[in-house]
């Protein structure tokens, strides 16, 4: 027994029980229904109602089946699922599969297949294999959804035109010209109105538009089209909901056994993958909102699979469509402010009430309006963002094969083809190894790009034997894998070179990281002995995630490990950090002292060590940020000569350039050569502060030629006509608008801005300096903030944290007004050739905010990290 655990006789004064000995233990109460959950459930219900009817129409199932699936998905998955804020119901991604099953086996057998698929999902959930579904390549998933979207859009187009769709895409495409020749005007008019409202409603401008946008666009589109059809007296097919007493339930499955098994596997695969990927995407949405992520934990994928399986069993048994997690409704649930699974469950209850009490209202909806709604959902499933993503990762072939397979062969066949293509691409990449050799100044360089497997050993040996015995050689291994055969070949060649007096230096793919003396994979010498990597070089990774992206200058008695990306968090040697008031100045290399000039203290010159406060936290508030941090040394001096010799910033600069030339230049040389030939054609002018913490290309995910950047202290735009003695900002604006023809200008402020702090601490008696003369262009921002008649600039969901943040937000809006006063900008705005945007970047949170459309309310909206499509 533990010495810290008291035994019964240790208690000399036992206390009496505060409750009766036989009273039952208090049961923990579940989360109560909050106002946020109630309002979110209403928003989701208003979206789910028309979509459920539309998806049922697209599958050819009874329209009531869509309502049954929506209700069961809300209540059952909401209660049992592992993703509390994910909303489940009939999904557009299942439309093609379900329609094919109904066409082949009939409705009652399709319901039985749904029940069996739910049982299969329960079995997979009990086996805890949910994470395995995430191993499917995103290119396959996106390709599957795109193929389903194309199939849905082509089929619903016939209903929009007043006709009847066929069961296959080829037949629908073949009969489309004939359908266009005999289009029904009334059906087309109602569909066009539905699509117009669906597209225009989320883009309503101004304060009134923001209030109206609270009503979901699908509901507005269907309601508007229904009202218009009724007022104009159009005679169109409408929703027909027969009595629930005649509703068809599941029957015994009838058909060939192999066909039924394939159908069950298809429903199981599509439902499971879509639901699990949706749960992961909802986790990303929640993580982007810190106040919500503290209350809602990460999704339990195995429990989510169990919940989806139970819902499919119930939905199929009650005559409903298959159930899966739905992106559109899940996004609406999170954005509407839901904080628990109660919102999902209540939305299901509301669907039940509507299905029982609102039948006369639902039967007024024209089928053409629902078809237009579902067609829009199908088109949105072909996401340009996904296409760009798979293209960037060189998986466009997998995407294309999966999409075409789903469109012309079927979902299961398309996914099978996509998996086969993905495996082929992976094998091709594994076996595609490029080995080159060249001699430079007497040193033989051998570079290996790709994975070193036994298949590449013959080419590796051939190339290595081009190096004369006894020569000096550098072998760069630009890959992440080396098997035993390649390891042995490299080791034997290295031993032979050493025996003839040659030297071999093995360099890893990271700049400056040498593999021991030399070492092999995982830090071992090529003879098998443990080795220590050479730490004499810089460990920075260009164009990779970094932590301060700086290298400490090695010195005797101190470690040179400065928290490189290779080392991971928490490995920074604190010996390299000096006290804040004795750090070397970023500009002079001398020891810096606090400055009182214009109320702007000196900038910190080292990155924060683990445990230090963020750059804009209260502990560091007041530091100017227009000077780049530099690595510290024990001597506190730097060469500052730019020669690249000795210690200090000169050597650091030379190392950075060398890293660029070795790793980054080969990757961007082709693009830069094209830009050199064609000239710059940026789409945006980005005007931001000179603060070193704002990396414009990083926070906008842009590359060479994308942004025309103007930086100055405080992201200020002097109004035209100001005698400032500096026309550089106005010249850049004129050049960007009139010469480069940029399509947008963004003014970006940031948290902890030293210029805004200086404006707030301004003292009229201070000696006039160039900095003070420049900062007077921020005076209108201070006056605007003090003007009580104007709306207060704020972030979505909260007010400004302090006066500095308030001024940072107000300054962005004021500088946009200064921009509009420039002739070139005003002309382009009147011609509709230019857009202005306001942006705020919170450095400590690494979070961007965009000024809401119109900007009348001066609200900066949170920019999320996940983009869920239908």
Image: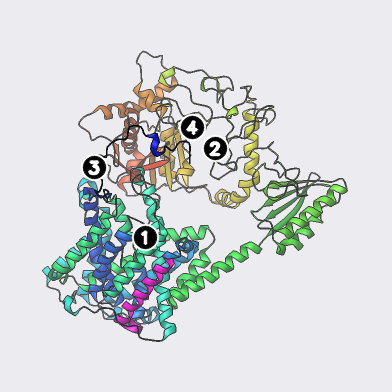
Res. 378 visible in picture: no
Give the residue drawn at x 65%, y 56%: 481
Please tell me the numbered disc located at residue 611: 4
Task: Find the distance from the CA under tag 1 to the CA under tag 3.
Answer: 55 Å
Residue annotated with mark 1: 869
Q: Quadrant of residue 799?
A: top left
Image depth: mark 1 or mark 3 in front: 3
* Coordinates of residue 477 in the picture (x, y in percent): 69, 51
* Coordinates of residue 205 in the picture (x, y in percent): 25, 49
Image depth: mark 1 or mark 2 in front: 2
The reply to whether dot 4 and dot 2 touch (C-beta < 8 Å) is no
Q: Earlier in the sequence, mark 1 or mark 2?
A: 2
Task: Find the distance from the CA under tag 4 to the CA under tag 2.
Answer: 9 Å
Q: Neighbour class for label 4 at 10 Å: few (<14), some, many (≥20)? A: few
In the displayed structure, 407 sits above or below 10; it is: below
Residue annotated with mark 3: 19
Q: Neighbour class for label 3 at 10 Å: few (<14), some, many (≥20)? A: few
Please tell me the numbered disc located at residue 570: 2
* Coordinates of residue 217 in the picture (x, y in percent): 24, 59
Using the image as rendered, state which of residue 66 and residue 431 is in the foreground: 66
């Amino acid at each position: 027994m533990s010495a810290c655990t008291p035994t019964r006789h240790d208690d000399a004064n036992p206390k009496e029980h505060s409750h009766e000995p036989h009273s039952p233990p208090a049961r923990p109460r579940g989360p109560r229904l909050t106002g946020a959950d109630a309002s979110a459930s209403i928003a989701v219900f208003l979206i789910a109602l028309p979509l459920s009817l539309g998806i049922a129409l697209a599958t050819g199932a009874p329209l009531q089946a869509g309502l049954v699936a929506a209700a069961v998905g809300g209540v059952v998955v909401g209660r049992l699922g592992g993703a509390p804020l994910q909303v489940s119901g009939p999904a557009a991604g299942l439309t093609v599969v379900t329609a094919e099953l109904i066409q082949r086996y009939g409705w009652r057998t399709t319901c039985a297949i749904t029940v069996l698929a739910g049982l299969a999902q329960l079995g997979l959930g009990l086996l805890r294999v949910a994470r395995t579904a995430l191993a499917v390549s995103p290119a396959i998933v996106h390709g599957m959804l795109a193929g389903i979207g194309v199939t849905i859009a082509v089929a619903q187009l016939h209903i929009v035109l007043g006709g009847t769709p066929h069961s296959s895409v080829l037949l629908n495409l073949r009969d489309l010209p004939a359908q266009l020749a005999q289009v029904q005007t009334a059906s087309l008019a109602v569909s066009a109105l539905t699509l117009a409202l669906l597209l225009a409603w989320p883009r309503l401008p101004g304060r009134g538009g923001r209030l109206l946008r609270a009503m979901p666009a699908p509901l507005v589109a269907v309601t508007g089209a229904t009202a218009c059809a009724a007022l104009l007296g159009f005679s169109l097919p409408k929703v027909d909901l027969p009595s629930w007493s005649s509703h068809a339930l599941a029957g015994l499955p009838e058909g060939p056994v192999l066909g039924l098994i394939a159908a069950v596997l298809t429903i199981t695969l599509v439902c499971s993958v879509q639901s699990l990927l949706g749960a992961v995407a909802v986790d990303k949405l929640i993580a982007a909102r810190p106040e919500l992520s503290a209350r809602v934990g990460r999704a339990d994928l195995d429990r989510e699979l169990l919940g989806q399986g139970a819902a499919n069993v119930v939905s199929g048994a009650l005559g409903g469509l298959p159930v899966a997690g739905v992106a559109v409704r899940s996004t609406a649930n999170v954005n509407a402010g839901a904080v628990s699974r109660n919102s999902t469950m209540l939305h299901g209850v509301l669907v039940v009430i509507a299905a029982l009490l609102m039948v006369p209202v639902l039967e007024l909806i024209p089928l053409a309006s629902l078809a237009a709604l579902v067609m829009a959902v199908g088109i949105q499933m072909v996401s340009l963002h996904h296409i760009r993503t798979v293209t960037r990762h060189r998986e466009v072939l997998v995407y294309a094969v999966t999409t075409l397979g789903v469109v012309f062969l079927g979902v299961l066949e398309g996914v099978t083809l996509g998996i086969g293509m993905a495996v082929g691409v992976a094998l091709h990449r594994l076996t595609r190894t490029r080995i080159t050799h060249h001699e430079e100044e007497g040193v033989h360089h051998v570079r290996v790009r790709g994975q070193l497997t036994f298949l590449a050993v013959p080419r590796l040996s051939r190339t290595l034997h081009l190096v004369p015995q006894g020569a000096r050689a550098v072998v760069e291994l630009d890959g992440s894998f080396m098997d035993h055969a390649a390891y042995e070949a490299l080791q034997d060649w290295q031993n032979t070179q050493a025996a003839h007096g040659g030297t071999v230096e093995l360099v890893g793919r990271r700049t400056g990281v040498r593999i021991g003396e030399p070492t092999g994979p995982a830090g071992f010498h090529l003879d098998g002995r443990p080795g220590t990597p050479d730490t004499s070089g810089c460990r920075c990774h260009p164009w990779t995630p970094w932590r301060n992206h700086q290298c400490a200058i090695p010195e005797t008695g101190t470690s040179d490990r400065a928290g490189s990306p290779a080392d991971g968090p928490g490995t920074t040697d604190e010996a390299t950090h000096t006290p804040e008031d004795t750090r070397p100045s970023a500009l002079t290399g001398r020891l810096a002292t606090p400055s009182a000039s214009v109320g702007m203290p000196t900038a910190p010159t080292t990155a924060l060590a683990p445990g230090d406060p963020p750059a804009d936290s209260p502990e560091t508030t007041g530091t100017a940020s227009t000077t780049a941090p530099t690595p510290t040394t024990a001597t506190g001096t730097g060469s500052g000569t730019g020669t690249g010799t000795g210690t200090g910033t000169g050597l650091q600069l030379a190392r950075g350039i060398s890293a660029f030339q070795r790793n980054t230049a080969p990757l961007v040389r082709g693009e830069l050569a094209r830009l050199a030939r064609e000239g710059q054609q940026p789409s945006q002018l980005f005007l931001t502060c000179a603060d070193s913490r704002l990396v414009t290309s990083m926070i906008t995910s842009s590359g060479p030629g994308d942004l025309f950047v103007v930086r100055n202290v405080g992201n200020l735009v002097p109004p035209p006509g100001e005698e400032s003695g500096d026309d550089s900002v106005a010249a850049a604006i004129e050049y960007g608008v009139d010469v480069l023809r940029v399509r947008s200008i963004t003014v970006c402020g940031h948290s902890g801005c030293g210029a805004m702090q200086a404006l707030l601490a301004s003292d009229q008696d201070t000696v006039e300096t160039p900095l003070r003369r420049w900062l007077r262009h921020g005076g209108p921002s201070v006056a605007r903030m003090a003007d009580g008649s104007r709306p207060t600039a704020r972030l979505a969901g909260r007010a400004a944290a302090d006066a500095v943040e308030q001024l940072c937000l107000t300054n962005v809006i004021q500088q946009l007004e200064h921009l509009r006063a420039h002739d070139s900008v005003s002309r382009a705005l009147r011609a509709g050739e230019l857009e202005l945007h306001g942006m705020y970047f919170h450095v400590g949170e690494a979070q961007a905010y965009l000024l809401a459309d119109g900007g009348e309310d001066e609200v900066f909206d949170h920019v999320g990290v996940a983009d869920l499509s239908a």
